[in-house]
């Protein structure tokens, strides 16, 4: 193999490697890139302090843009990702869940469901999220919502997972307290996700 051929093969491999890494680390494959949303883990709610930081590398910024997080400065907004229930099982649109949590020390908060294509689930239910303006706080200081593919029709707040496939949830905190920003593992009580059952599941 001549020098020119070796140079050409090396160039092609370098280009393919660069494109492949950009596609993967930018979040364009079914596999989440390593590191992102892994730096902070609180009961399987994961986050990354690089999001919204001037120190974020190009791959992190591409991933954030791909996921539509906007990537505001951490002082303005922090983002926590959840892809499993409290049993560690993937969140699936044919299963039903209860999500419940305490009111966080933040100016505003929301939990939004995103389908397996990173977009809002394609349905007409108009029930993609819960936030502080719509949550009902019980006497125990907790808010709750049902996550499933059909309206429970029992007065429960409903987040629709219809047509979402294997979905995840983004917990947004706007203007969180300094304690949450500095020591989230101690200051932030994250919502629980309790699986109620799945379609086709054998009754015990």
Image: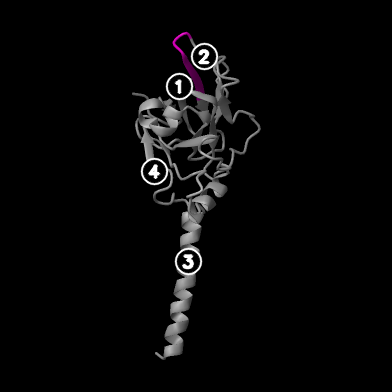
Q: What percent of the width, then of the height, locates residue 99?
A: 46, 24
CA–CA distance in space, label 3 to label 1: 42 Å
CA–CA distance in space, label 1 to label 2: 10 Å
- Nearer to us: label 1 or label 2: 2
Q: Please report the bounds of the magenta region as a residue range.
A: 139-146
Dot 4: few (<14), some (14–19), or many (≥20) neighbours within 10 Å? some
Name the residue beneath numbered marker 2: 137
Q: Quadrant of the N terminus?
A: bottom left
Q: Earlier in the sequence, mark 2 or mark 3?
A: 3
Q: Nearer the viewer, residue 96 or 114?
A: 114
Q: Secondary structure at mark 2?
A: loop
Residue shown at 38%/31% (left/top)?
Answer: 183
Q: Secondary structure at mark 4?
A: loop
CA–CA distance in space, label 2 to label 3: 49 Å
Name the residue beneath numbered marker 4: 38
Q: Earlier in the sequence, mark 3 or mark 4?
A: 3
CA–CA distance in space, label 4 to label 1: 23 Å
Q: Is residue 50 left or right of residue 154?
A: left
Q: What percent of the width, then of the height, locates residue 17?
A: 45, 67
Which image quarter: residue 90?
A: top left
Name the residue beneath numbered marker 3: 18
Residue shown at 54%/40% (left/top)?
Answer: 73
Residue that extends furthest to the bottom in the rendered view of this protein: 2
Q: Is residue 107 rendered magenta in the image?
A: no
Mark linked to residue 100 = 1
Q: Earlier in the sequence, mark 4 or mark 1?
A: 4
What secondary structure is the magenta-colored segment mainly?
Answer: strand
Q: Earlier in the sequence, mark 1 or mark 2?
A: 1
Q: Secondary structure at mark 1?
A: strand
Q: Are marks 4 and 1 in contact (CB under 8 Å)?
A: no
Q: Earlier in the sequence, mark 2 or mark 4?
A: 4
Compared with 35, 86 (above or below) is: above
């Amino acid at each position: 193999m001549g020098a020119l051929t070796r140079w050409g093969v090396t160039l092609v491999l370098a280009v393919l490697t660069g494109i492949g890494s950009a596609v993967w680390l930018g979040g364009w494959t079914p596999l989440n890139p390593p590191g992102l949303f892994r730096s902070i883990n609180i009961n399987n709610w994961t986050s990354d302090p690089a999001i919204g930081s001037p120190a974020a590398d190009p791959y992190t910024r591409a991933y954030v843009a791909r996921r539509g997080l906007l990537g505001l400065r951490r002082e303005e907004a922090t983002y926590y990702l959840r892809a499993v229930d409290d049993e560690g099982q993937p969140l699936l649109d044919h299963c039903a869940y209860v999500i419940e949590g305490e009111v966080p020390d933040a100016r505003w908060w929301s939990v939004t469901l995103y389908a397996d294509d990173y977009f809002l689930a394609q349905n007409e239910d108009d029930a993609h999220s819960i936030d502080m303006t719509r949550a009902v706080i019980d006497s125990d200081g907790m808010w709750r919502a049902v996550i499933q593919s059909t309206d429970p029709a029992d007065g429960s707040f409903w987040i629709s997972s219809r047509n979402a496939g294997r979905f995840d949830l983004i917990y947004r905190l706007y203007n969180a307290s300094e304690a949450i920003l500095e020591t989230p593992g101690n200051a932030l009580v994250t919502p629980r996700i309790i699986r109620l059952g799945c379609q086709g599941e054998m009754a015990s």
